[in-house]
Image (tube, rainbow, N blue to C red):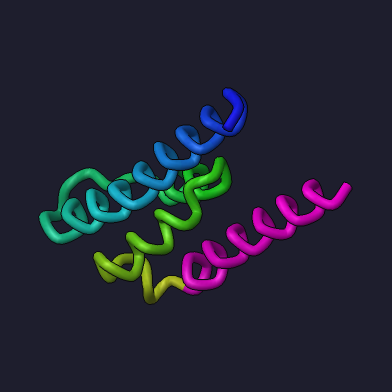
Amino acid sequence: MDNLHTISLIYLLVLNLMGFFSMGADKAKAESNSWRTPEKTLFLIAILGGSIGSILGMKIFRHKTRHAHFVIGMPLILGIQLAAILILHFI
């Protein structure tokens, strides 16, 4: 595996961990009525490559699962990312 692939995998791992733990942290903050992570930030992490971790965080922490823009938006972001990877792979 060359350096670009290694860097890409590390980048995606970090972003997905950020997505996962951001959902968990925001859930904890919601339960304690503390300052919350802005929804824009949660979506930005997903858009930048952390969509799988964000979706897993939503499911495991049962967070944002009643918000249609998250329930639809997060899988949509993942779908677009997967489509982009397939298109780029076959070009």
* Image x and y of residue 22, in percent: 31, 47
Main secondary structure type of the part rendered in magenta: helix
* Residue 78 rendering spot, x and y as whole percentages: 59, 59
Q: Quadrant of residue 10?
A: top left
Q: How many marks?
A: 0
Task: Tell me: 86 left or right of 14.
Answer: right
Give the residue drawn at x 24%, y 54%: 24
User: Farthest residue in the right direction?
Assistant: 91
Describe residue 59's horizontal placement relative to residue 75 as left or right.
left
Q: Position of residue 34 (x, y in %)?
A: 16, 47
Is 68 positioned to the left or the right of 90 in the image?
left
Depth check: 79 or 40 in front? 79
Q: Say which residue appears at 48% left-offset and 72% top-offset.
A: 71
- In the image, taking residue 20 as reference, residue 68 lies left or right, namely right
Magenta region: which residues? 68-91
Instruction: Please say whether residue 87 is one of the residues in the magenta stretch.
Output: yes
Closest to the observer: 55 or 87? 87
Residue 55 in the image, given as x and y percentages of width and height: 42, 63
Find out whether residue 82 is within the magenta segment. yes
Residue visible at 28% across and 48% down? 21
Give 34 or 76, whichever is nearer the viewer: 76
Q: Residue at x 28, y 70 (%)?
A: 62
Image height of 62 relative to 86, above or below: below
Q: Quadrant of the N terminus?
A: top right
Q: Does residue 89 lie above or below 65 as drawn?
A: above
